[in-house]
Amino acid sequence: MTRIHPLLLFLLTILIPLSIAANPPTFYCKCTCLTNFTIIKLAPLPTADDICTQCKRTYCLNYNLPICKDIEESQIKADCFQRDSVKDRFIVWAFILGTAGLLGWAGIRRLVELREQNKGGGLFGVLGGGGSSGAEGGRGTGLFGRGRPGGQAGAYSPLDDPRGGGGRAG
């Protein structure tokens, strides 16, 4: 099995987030007329450094919004904001993937430990019985504490009861 070189892994870890964060964010202008409002996506301007400079009262009036008809300019409020930046998305996805990776690693580690306890019973030996270790005369107990005598996987049968007869001794 080939291993990923640590330097390559480090570079990918650094370069991928930087390339994602290089995308320009999306800005919106919220035009509020009395109690009603409309959100308008702002187009990036090639000459302006700050895209929010275009989100003003006059911008809302020039957009000819139906909610702003017959309203004075003093009754209009314009707010510029940014929603769902790429940086925020990256942080959320990194957290989700990191958490899922840690949970997966913990699960795999637990299966490996149980497999070592069962002396190579394999995945099915860990989950359902099998293997040849155990305190009850070679009975593989597995993850769920089941198994048949002799290490055979399967459901317990009263016919396999070591006391014989399949019934209770009384």
Image (tube, helix red, strand yellow):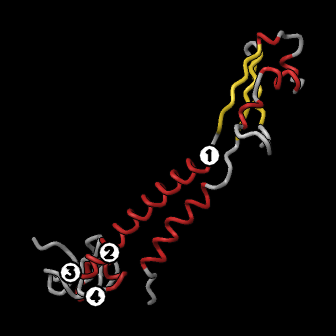
Please name the residue that numbered disc 4 is placed on. 120
- Marks 1 and 2, the one that precedes in the sequence: 1
In this rendering, which labeled residue sits more in front, label 1 or label 4?
A: 1
Q: Is residue 32 left or right of residue 150?
A: right
Q: Amino acid at mark 4?
A: Gly
In this rendering, which labeled residue sits more in front, label 2 or label 3?
A: 2
- CA gap between label 3 and label 4 equals 26 Å
Q: Which mark is residue 111?
A: 2
- Marks 2 and 3, the one that precedes in the sequence: 2
Mark 3 surroundings within 10 Å by alpha-carbon count, few (fewer than 14), some (14 through 19), many (20 or more): some
Taking the spot 88% from the left edge, 21% from the top edge, the residue there is 66
Q: Is residue 76 left or right of residue 128?
A: right
**Disc 4, SS:** loop
Residue 163 spot, x, y in % from top left: 14, 81
Q: Quadrant of residue 39?
A: top right
- Marks 4 and 2, the one that precedes in the sequence: 2
**Disc 1, SS:** loop
In this rendering, which labeled residue sits more in front, label 1 or label 2?
A: 1
